[in-house]
Amino acid sequence: MWRKLALVVPCYNEAERFAPEAYAAALAARPDLSLVFVDDGSADDTRAVLTAFAQQQATPGRVAVHGLDVNQGKAEAVRQGVRHVGDYFPDADFVGYWDADLATPFAALDDFAAALEAQPHAKFLLGSRVRLMGRDIDRRTTRHFLGRVFATAASLVVDLPIYDTQCGAKIIERDLAQALFEEPFATAWIFDVELLSRFLRRVGRDQALRLVVEVPLHQWRDVAGSKVKSRDFVRAGLDLARVWRTHRDG
């Protein structure tokens, strides 16, 4: 598995929802983990809350706060975080991104680590919200079915048998991540699909089938205050058409 993992956490107006105890517990439990919070031009006290959290850690140097002066959206916030990981944590060999609301709990890192240990050739790991008996995947019914429609369309666009492209928990080998996040994304809502399309164009389908691993999550929950609304699926559909055209031409 990885030696050092740096997770990028994009934050926009998260001052009220930020859960310092959960983040502190994850850092205490995993000495291999570092965090890069990206404040995406928040209008509330998010940056101050994140900075205070970073300063209060018992082990200094494992939490960085990267600030953007203007809100640029999740895709750009994640991209900027990935691009600057080396400035904060040059020894990280894997880089990931994680939703700030912890809809995917940090316990899922054990699932990612086990998947990478079982398939050490993997370079691109995706969390997958698969509803199975014995797993605690709590997703609103409307979003679940809209998500299944979108995921099916996305898998057809990139020609990969992916169950869930949009889960906000992904981990990528660092050098690969740096290359994939070098250019800005053309899509605001479904940059995850665009990221997979870039990866396919870089390595080809055969290699992608070997290097991409989906990790079924044991737990995931819709968190109150989510910024994703049902109408955003319409925008996502338009973005998906844009990715399809780019992917086809590429």
Image (tube, rainbow, N blue to C red):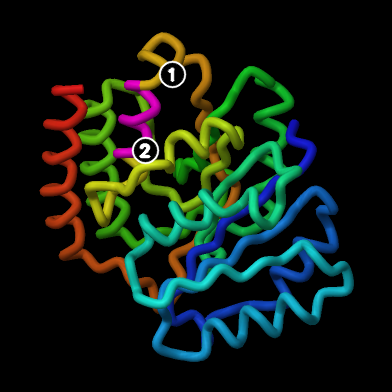
Q: CA distance from mark 2 to mark 1?
A: 12 Å
- Residue sitting nearer the eye, 199 or 23: 199
Mark 2 lies on a secondary structure that is: helix
Q: Which mark is residue 208?
A: 1
- Local packing at callout 2 (Cα closer than 10 Å; few below 14, some 14-19, many 20+) is some
Residue 177 percent across, percent down from the top left: 52, 37
Q: Residue at x 52, y 90 (%)?
A: 45
Q: Quadrant of residue 153?
A: top left
Task: State yes or no: residue 79 in magenta.
Answer: no
Mark 1 lies on a secondary structure that is: helix
Q: Residue at x 38, y 61 (%)?
A: 74
Residue range highlighted in magenta: 194-201
The kind of secondary structure the magenta stretch mainly shows is helix
Q: Dots 2 and 1: beta carbons under 8 Å?
A: no
Q: Residue at x 36, y 32 (%)?
A: 196
User: How many discs mark residues in the rendered view?
Assistant: 2
Residue 242 percent across, percent down from the top left: 13, 40
* Residue that numbered label 2 is attached to: 195
Q: From where the camera sits, is residue 101 visible?
A: no
Query: What amino acid is labelled 1 in the image?
Result: Ala
